[in-house]
Image: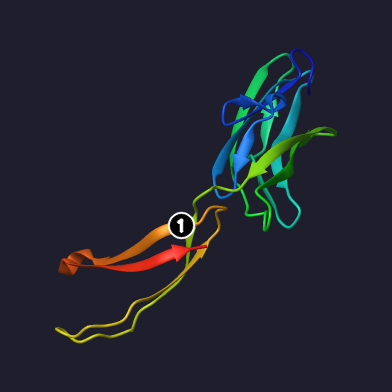
Amino acid sequence: VGGDGGINVEVDGVNVNANPAIVVGDTITVRIEFTSNVNASDITVEVELEGDREDVSVETRAFDVEQGQRYVKSLRLDVPFDLKDTLSGDVTLNVDINGDGFRTEDSFTLRLQRAPFDASIKAVSVPQTVKAGELFPVDVVLKNLGYSNLDDLSVTASIPALGLERTAFFGDLV
């Protein structure tokens, strides 16, 4: 694989050599375009985001290539939460085209950033049974995964089938 034009890799439409930034929690599209310089079977394209704490990867189904033909594969990856006390850091994007006795690999560095505002629902607890006409508690556990304070946060719980909806004020979430 390789040959005419080599391997072009884009992340969300931006060439990897243009230093694209990705955001924790997003889903990115990695587009790999290459020209085959061989006829080969059982080719797979794998992309992996390699972080400090967590790696994620996805792979295509096996396919065949013909010499001189151009191929494009697009894969979607969920960007893991890999930053704790910092606003940004680097992750490695590995691209591996493999099959039928050959392998082409390349790695790229991407900038990983935390979102400024990211309220994550960690748990919701409600009673298993309730009686008509009675109030019942809904416990919600939230965590701020962003780097900015969430001011004046509120949560709305609803049961659309019954036309019920209530909003509770949580205040500021650091």
What quarter of the picture does the N terminus occupy? top right
Between 47 and 172, the one lying in front of the other is 172
Specify whether residue 96 is in view: no
Residue 60 spot, x, y in % from top left: 64, 39
Query: What residue appears at the point 63 percent right and 54 percent down from the top-left corner?
Result: 81
**Vertical position of residue 61 compared to residue 156: above or below:** above
Residue 142 spot, x, y in % from top left: 47, 67
- Which secondary structure, mark 1? strand
Q: What colouring does the structure picture have?
A: rainbow
**Vertical position of residue 131 compared to residue 161: above or below:** below
Give amino acid for label 1: Leu
- Asked whether, in this view, residue 20 is left or right of residue 1, the answer is left
Disc 1 designates what residue? 150
Between 14 and 32, the one lying in front of the other is 14
Residue 166 spot, x, y in % from top left: 24, 68
Residue 53 spot, x, y in % from top left: 74, 57
Query: What residue appears at the point 31 percent right and 81 percent down from the top-left corner?
Result: 137
Residue 133 placement: quadrant: bottom left
Specify whether residue 166 is in view: yes
Total label count?
1
Q: Residue furthest right?
A: 101
Residue 67 placement: quadrant: top right
Query: What residue appears at the point 65 percent right and 22 percent down from the top-left corner?
Result: 71
Q: Residues within 10 Å of mark 1 (few under 14, many from 20)?
A: some
- Asked whether, in this view, residue 128 is left or right of residue 160, the answer is right
